[in-house]
Amino acid sequence: MTIIPVVEERVVVTRELYLREEIHVRRVHRTETDEIPVTLRRQTVRIERSSIEDRDDESPIKHKDDQDEL
């Protein structure tokens, strides 16, 4: 007696991940200061007045010309 194998052909598909390339990412924190002229729609000013007796002798008197502009 002779045995003849009967076979069936099957396609087996699998997905595998392969490393193709690497990307190296690094974060850099950067701060820039820039002056941009703008038109103000509203401006609020708060003025506190004190008498000369309440003021410290160490605090200098600021004149209008010495103050910073807003």
Image: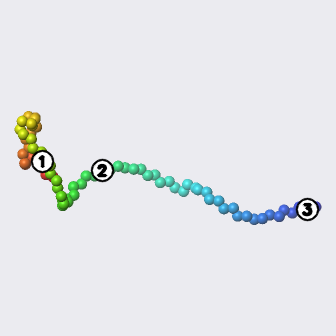
* Location of residue 54 with respect to 40 vertically, above or below: above
Q: Distance between the residues labelled 1 and 2?
A: 33 Å
**Labels 1 and 2 touching (C-beta < 8 A):** no
Quadrant of the snapshot with the N terminus: bottom right
* Location of residue 30 with respect to 39 vertically, above or below: above
Q: How many labels does the image show?
A: 3
Badge 3 amino acid:
Thr
Residue that mark 2 sits on = 31
Whole-percent x and y of residue 44? 16, 53
**Labels 2 and 3 touching (C-beta < 8 A):** no
Say left or right for 22 vs 59. right
Task: In this rendered view, identify the residue nearer to me: 42 or 2.
Answer: 42
Q: Residue at point 9% right, 37% down?
A: 55
Q: Which of marks 1 and 2 is in front?
A: 1
Badge 1 amino acid:
Ile
Residue that mark 1 sits on = 47
Residue that mark 3 sits on = 2
Crowding at mark 3 (Cα within 10 Å: few <14, some 14-19, many 20+): few
